[in-house]
Amino acid sequence: MIKRFIYSQKVAPYVFVLPFILVFTIFWAYPLLDSFEMSFQKVALGQDSNWVGFANYEKLLGDKVFLKALTNSAIYMVLTLVILIPFPMLFAVLINSKLMWGREFFKASFFFPALTSVVVAGTIFRLMFGEMEGSLMNSLLSLFGIDPVKFLKGQVTGFIALLALAAWRWTGVNMLYFLSGLKNISDDYYEAAAIDGASKWQQFTRITVPLLKPTSIYVLTISIYAGLAMFIESMMLWNGNNSPKNIGLTIVGYLYRQGIEKNNLGYAAAVGIVLLAITMIINVTQLSISGMFKKEDQS
Amino acid sequence: MRHEKMTKVGLFFVFAIVCFFILIPFYAIALASFKPGGDLVRYGLNLSFDFSVMSFNNFVYLFTGSHSYFNWFFNSVFLTIVQVVLTLLISATVAYGFAAYNFVGKNFLFVCVLMIMMVPFEILLLPLYKLTNDLGLMNTYSAIVLPGIASAATIFFFRQYISGIPKEIIAAGRVDGASEYGIYVRLIIPVMKPSFAAMAILNGMNSWNNFIWPFMVLSETVKYTLPIGLKTLLTPYGNNYDLLIVGSFFSIVPILILFLAFQKYFIDGMTAGAVKG
């Protein structure tokens, strides 16, 4: 009887999706709700929690360190977008050209960095951007007669190191995304454009860029997400969560500092909720703007 | 035609230069793994060749020294295998449920899958940490494996793939008297094989390189995974550069070999998300 019930066509789909329901409830929905609840409490691991109303959020508003973390994450996110969308797109178009030699070799070597873990990549970049005269970046600078720079002690130079790390790891991956987008564009468009006398540059701006829009939106969405949630890169470059004057502190870094290092889970949960709100607002705006453009294209 | 040849050479040079810069860090760490750690502290990581200081000492130490490197290495291998096998099996099963049936609550549940993909996992770090603590799962591998076992991105990919399989296969199975589960196991899974390769690579890479969550959960040195172990070599009280550099270098090697052997699947797995558009 029970066997017949479980084997019926009505019940089977629920058996198939049951693992998802369990994991979703226990490890996603519950923690997320708990996060909301904690953000209105004062919580420390192993102690009773107290309701504090909006106190955590009020404190966040006046928290200069949080503001610093927020600015850092925002600047980092914007700069990664500026680097990691146009360049990979350009590389993808060039590498896809019929005139390209050694295409497979370049594709593979551009992708190599994505295979390294953040820990290993971060360690290498930390040492390359070391402050010693002989470290890679400084010896490069000395070729141009520039004195050694203490990269990881300054705001701008520290960000250069962070962005170099991001560019190194993700250029190849984003290039592959654009390459798979290019596969969906028919050659007919380019042939027709060439007959009409369009230059290569016009073909790029009038055909390639608009038709790559779905890929660009995908890359944009994951880059916004990754940029705002960046933490381990900074942790590796500065060997811990404490950079001088917090030049490398990010939103998640601050969440980690408050929650894990200071056992101030309620306050940290409020930081998490603010991050959630920001990503949601950006994603919804971004998706509705790109959706709106789609309608205009059709008319 | 002369113009075309010039473009060819120009393109090649541009890519060769970019490629050179991309490969520098690999070259630098490979070089450094032959130099004494003290050198690194004194001169920094650089590209200078000096045969008088270079030796295989670090590699000898890596393979024969008393340290936990290979303990961490095999922990990572073990965890990666367990995680990939479980995630693929469970995500594929869930995806089949979504793709092959219509049932009450299906749309709602699928929105839940999409929601997981849209919320940064980092927000859940603290409540998950608290939950793990409450469940008594601190310092266990279960705490690392369980939350990711029904991976949203993997479910999404498999669902797309199964939707492309002709529904007649399922109908034919029913006519032949196979049970609902028999159809999935005997008829669908064999057809899904190609999609498993790409997802195995994607999940395997994520698992092999996974850092922050295992770092928060694991507290015993013998249980560390490779990234955590390597991270602990960087301490505020002086760094163990000898092992760190050669160990970092060596950790890249297996994945590089896998990549060269299965390049197509790596690229399919990594770009699986974008193709769905």
Image (spheres, rainbow, N blue to C red):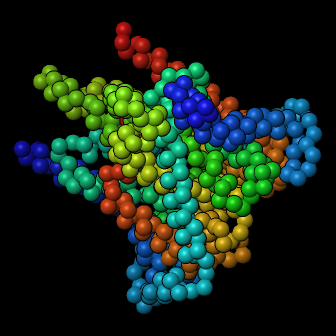
Question: Quadrant of residue B225 in the image?
Answer: bottom right
The answer to whether one can see residue B42 in this image is no
The answer to whether one can see residue B122 in this image is yes
Question: Quadrant of residue B218 in the image?
Answer: bottom right
Horizontal side, residue A273 vs residue A11: left or right: right
Horizontal side, residue A272 vs residue A143: left or right: right
Looking at the image, which is closer to me, B1 or B134?
Answer: B134
**Total tally of numbered discs in the picture:** 0
Image height of A99 relative to A149, above or below: above
Horizontal side, residue A71 vs residue A63: left or right: left
Looking at the image, which is closer to me, B90 or A191?
Answer: B90
Image height of A188 relative to B153, above or below: above
The residue depicted at 82 percent of the width and 39 percent of the height is: A38
In the rendered image, the residue lying farthest to the bottom is B52
Image height of B11 relative to B155, above or below: below
* Image location (x, y in percent) of residue B177: 40, 32
User: Which quarter of the image is occupied by the C terminus of chain B?
Assistant: top left
* Image location (x, y in percent) of residue A262: 83, 54
In the rendered image, the residue lying farthest to the left is B1
User: Which quarter of the image is occupied by the N terminus of chain B?
Assistant: top left
